[in-house]
Amino acid sequence: MKISKKNLPFIGLSSLVLLTSSFATAADMSGMDHSGMDMSDMDHSGMDMSDMDMSGMDHSGMDMSGDMSDMDHSGMDMSGDMSDMDHSGMDMSGDMSDMDHSGMDMSGDMSDMDHSGMDMSGDMSGMDHSGMDMSGDMSGMDHSGMDMSGDMSGMDHSGMDMSGDMSGMDHSGMDMSGMDHGSMDMSGMQGGQPPADARSPDYSNGVPYGQYGKPMMMGSMPLWGVSVDDLGYQFDEDQINFEATGWYGTDSNRIRLRTEGSAQTKDDKEIDSLSSLAYWKPLSIFWNGEAGVAYDTENDNAALMAGIVGTAPYFIETDARAYLYTDGQLRLDLGAEYEWRLDQHWVVIPEVGLTAFSKDDHDNGITKGFNEMEAEVRLTYETFSRQLAPYVGVSYETALGKARGQRRQENESVDSSSLTAGVKFWF
């Protein structure tokens, strides 16, 4: 066949134009339509899509329902710009078992990719994503309508890198039943990896087991404590006042030993105290009940005791205890205390107490009704995690009702006040 020489320049120019247009088409795939594409037995192992602009690609009608088992994507490079790709109608319901994505590079920009209508209900068991790189920008990807209800058992995501930006991805309607992500690396997601000691292997979180081999709640563990609310000296009265409580038990049931009184430091050094041993139990959120036995050294008499202790409105610590003595005498003690915090250490504590009796007992200086009122204001400084608090203050004591006249007849003071100093602590 003869070819005229004068036609050669035209043929060469045409070939150059066709070659250039084919490269341009390969580089720019935005707007491509894969709606009827059959991908069975395709090999993508060496496919390089890193320099291609795939933004705007439309896979909405792409049919991948055929047999795609053994497809190899291990060397596929998708690091280019894939933003705005549309997979909303993509059908992947075929057999995709044993597909290999181990070396697939998806580190490019995949923000705003739409997978909302993607159908992946086929057989994807055995798919390998172990080396898949998804460190690119995937923010805004939409998987809300993605159907992954097929058989995905055996899929391997053990080496999958998802350290990129995946904020904004929507998986709200995605069905992923049967997938295995046992070794998946999600270190780039919000929150990072938990510390090694975040939770005990047996989920006990350090709480010891009880006698029946089950975790024991803190409220069920028997504990003990000692609280000395007052150990101070009254300078004008030359006496030491004390009030202390010890307990053992749980948050629901306790045994409490309590004592309060005063000890004279001059003359006969007499000690007057009222001690009780009681069972303690919560009655409500703010109130606890007590019941037990007591002994009063001032009148040398035993008694049955019942009381209620708790927090009144405005955080006023309140206690009310009744004592029924063996001789029929009934005693009622009422007390209230408030902690006014000046800062983290300095605290002002005002408190007041009232004592009443049901009948006269002249041998012990007791009259019917309210007999005595005691008030004290203390300035404390809490140290060592508030377990130790030295204080200074002023105390005031006065007789009430008929007790005032009886004290005058016995040449005793009706009112008295004194400077006090002491310490309160607990452990």
Image (cartoon, rainbow, N blue to C red):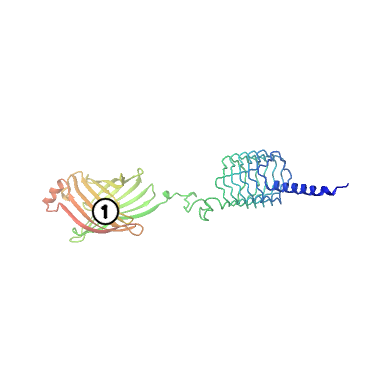
In the rendered view, does 177 fall on the left or right side of 427? right
**Residue at point 25% right, 55% down?**
378
Q: Position of residue 178 (x, y in %)?
A: 62, 43
Which residue is disc 1 drawn over? 260
Depth check, front residue: 66 or 323: 66
In the rendered view, does 253 fall on the left or right side of 296? right
| Image quarter in which the C terminus is found | bottom left
Q: Is residue 24 visible?
A: yes
Total numbered labels placed on residues in the image? 1
Q: Quadrant of residue 94?
A: top right
**Residue at point 83% right, 48% down?**
6
Q: Residue furthest bottom?
A: 266
Q: Position of residue 165 (x, y in %)?
A: 57, 50
Give neighbour class at mark 1: few <14, some 14-19, many 20+ (Cα, 10 Å): some
Q: Which amino acid, by three-letter code, is at mark 1?
A: Glu
**Residue at point 26% right, 53% down?**
260
Q: Position of residue 261 (x, y in %)?
A: 24, 54
Q: Residue furthest right?
A: 1
Q: Is residue 98 visible?
A: no
Q: Residue furthest front?
A: 6
Q: Position of residue 418 (x, y in %)?
A: 19, 57
In the rendered view, does 207 fall on the left or right side of 85? left
Q: Is residue 345 above or below residue 57?
A: below
Depth check, front residue: 310 or 26: 26
Secondary structure state at the residue bearing disc 1: strand
